[in-house]
Amino acid sequence: MVLRPLVLLALVVSDLYCLPASVNVFDSQGPGTVLQFFTFNCSSYTPTLKLLRVQPHTTFFNPPSLTRWQGIYVGKVTLSSSARLDALAVNHYELQLQFTCGNYVMEGPLSVDVQRDAGHIQCAGRFASPAGEIIQVPETVTPGARLYTLLLPGLEIQGAQMSITSAQEPPYFPGPFSINGQGWLQAPPQGLKGQAGKVFRLQILVTFGQNQSCGGMLMVKVLPAPSSGQVSFLEQEQNITIPEDVVPGTKVVQVQARGFDVRYEILSPVPCRLFSIGRADGVIRTTAPLELAPAAGSAVTALQVKAFERLRPWASVELDLTVTVRPVNRWPPRCLPALLMAQIPETAPVGTVLRTFTCVDPDSPGSTLDYQLRFHSPPGPASLCLNDGVLEVNATLDCDTRGDCFQHTASVLVLDGGQPRMTTEVPVLVMVTPVNEFSPACVPRTFRVREDAGPCTLLGSVVGTDMDYPHDCIEYYTSGGAGTFAVDRLSGEVHLLGPLDYEQQRLYRLTVLVTDHSQDQDPTRHLSGSCTITIEVEDVNDHPPECEPPFQELTVHTSLGHSMEVTKVSCRVPQEPQRVAFSYGIIGGNSQSRFSLQGAALVHNDLMLGPPWPEQPHTYELLIRVADAGPSTPHLSTTATVIVHLVPWRASTVATGTHRTTVPSVMTPLLVTDTEAFWQPEPWFVVVLTVTSALLLLALGWLLSRLLRRLAQVLPAPSKPAQALLLNSIQGTEGSIEGFMEAPRTETPQARSSVMNLHFDGSAQDSRTGREYLFNTRTGARRWL
């Protein structure tokens, strides 16, 4: 009692803001005992503490109280006035408490463990109850026989002393009842003959330890002697068969015997583990599960049952019963493994063992089981087989056809031989991993491409094949081609990268390497193949003809009524010497149609010349167009310039016939070639340059017009109209400009006298270049301005 405040203080400190889990209490604690303190913090509301329920239900516990102490709330749980704790009866109570603070609600259990108090032992049994216990004994009981046993657990340790404290004086008692050291109540030495119908009340006192005791009431009722009939069973030697799946407590059979106040007990086997018999009704029941598998000896049990009169135990009879337990198939087979997951390559040979199943029937260990393999996916031909619980590969696991492989879903059905037949199904999942077995291949192909095809032109596709699944997972690579061609890595399309020249190379051969991927469990395993791609370049007419020389100047003496060959135009394509077919035509300067072309020959024809016959020399500047001929396209052309000084026949002419004179070597014009590099400027620069050039041309035109006006005032007017002299056009293949410069020439003897007095009596403007020049109408001499 002195230490209790300290204990309570420790509980307050340790259990602040929480509900306890459990508390221990001795069964010697009486009403009002404090079991536990609780502390709570609730500043804004008035809290409540409730006892919601108690398991098992009892009234031993008061509703908890809640008081305020130094700013906190202290709860308390105590035992009620009806509390009679007994650790042998109930040793554990579960209390559910609820604490409420405003809207905050907290629940928690409180476990009360009841423990026996070694220093406080009370009497046990019905005789220690307030009503006491009544026993019945026949008047024929043997003097000094055991009538009752006082059940006082734990008192034997304390050395308890038991005695009868009530008066046993005659004539109410034939003699005193006694209690021996083993707690047996014994009949009086004189017996109970003639005491039938009487009830003897015995007050019993039990003392133990130091000043500790308990007591109880025992009433002995004497019954009259039974009849003198013999005890006998109605049936003899019974055989009973029951199934093994009956639950404990199931009635097996009821035995019945003739006699007065008959009681029953099992004589053999002792102890009887599987069966029990009702002492008064003779009903035999099961007391434990009748499983034959773990306990094979329980299949047949021989019971020996004794029936006797309660008042005359010596009047008894025995009965033999045989209980046979019939096996019941209750448990399906148990297999190891319960789930099979396997992974094998598609190249696994037939007969490869995947797994061996080990199955046992719990109802009948060692019995033979039946195995069946059922396929779920794919439902086609069986690739697996089962031989005596061994799962093997039954057929080639080919994964190169879509949907044929990669996963096999099946199940193994295991059946036992019991009744009813029990089955177990073991799921089977076999993953077949792909193996890269076949090398990819591609078909050689030939592509044709024009030599003027631009970059990124698609020539065609290389088609690769692979028999492994997934099919045609191929990448393409190329070697050779000097970077002119490329093959797309995924699609196999062949593209042109650079320019082609038929004249330099007409045939290309590319080696295309095909490599597979994603067709093996090992991502680094690849197989390769190759094929040759031939690319033929088609010729395209991309070089115009070139004439040598591109400019000719000739002096021809003609006579009336005769035709003559003036010159031949010699043209060729230097880049393509094989091109020798050309077409020729005069496109300019052939006034009055005095000239015609016979192939490459220029012919002057005077047959159609009519009067009046021209008396003065005349100059023709003929433009001859030379174009490709034949099937090649496009047709390119060039223009050759031939200047013909036509001198008509005179009577004073020394020559007696038609004389054709070619331009001497000193008259050969000087050919100057200027090559301009191609340049593609920015758009803004082109605009600025165009505007600047336009302004510059306008200024030059204005200056040139003023100069011509002044020159026209100085020079005399010409006697004849000015005759325009055609100039050779500027010819070039890649933007080159060809011009010619006027060179000195030697006139014929008939015109030499007029050349000496050189006079420019006319002016003109070139129709192609726009350049102005002065010329002599008689000799054709000119001077550029």
Image (cartoon, rainbow, N blue to C red):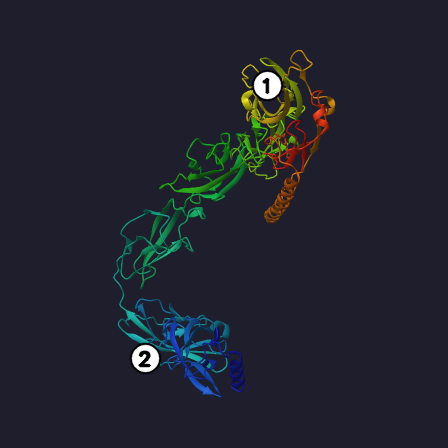
Q: Residues within 10 Å of mark 2 (few under 14, many from 20)?
A: few
Vertical arrangement, residue 623 with respect to residue 563, above or below = below
- Residue 170: image tag: 2
Q: Position of residue 400 (x, y in %)?
A: 51, 32
Secondary structure beneath dot 2 equals: loop
The furthest residue to the right = 666
Query: Crowdedness of circle 1 by 10 Å Cα count: few (<14), some, many (20+)?
Result: few
Secondary structure under tag 1 reads loop
Amino acid type, residue under disc 1 in the picture: Ala
Question: What residue type is disc 2 on?
Answer: Pro
Q: Residue 389's mark?
A: none
- Specify the quadrant of the image occupied by residue 669: top right
| Residue at mark 1 | 581
Q: Observer-nearest residue: 140 or 120?
A: 120
Can residue 180 be seen at all in this image of the molecule? yes
Q: Is residue 82 above or below residue 654?
A: below
Q: Nearer the viewer, mark 2 or mark 1?
A: 1
Instruction: Determine whether, in the image, residue 134 is placed left or right of residue 476.
Output: left
On the picture, is 432 further left or further right than 699? Answer: left
Foreground of the two, 745 or 284: 745
Query: Residue 636: percent from the left, percent from the top?
Result: 58, 27
Instruction: Please state the horizontal and vertical placement of residue 649, each as a whole percent of the image.
Output: 63, 16
Q: CA distance from mark 2 to mark 1?
A: 171 Å
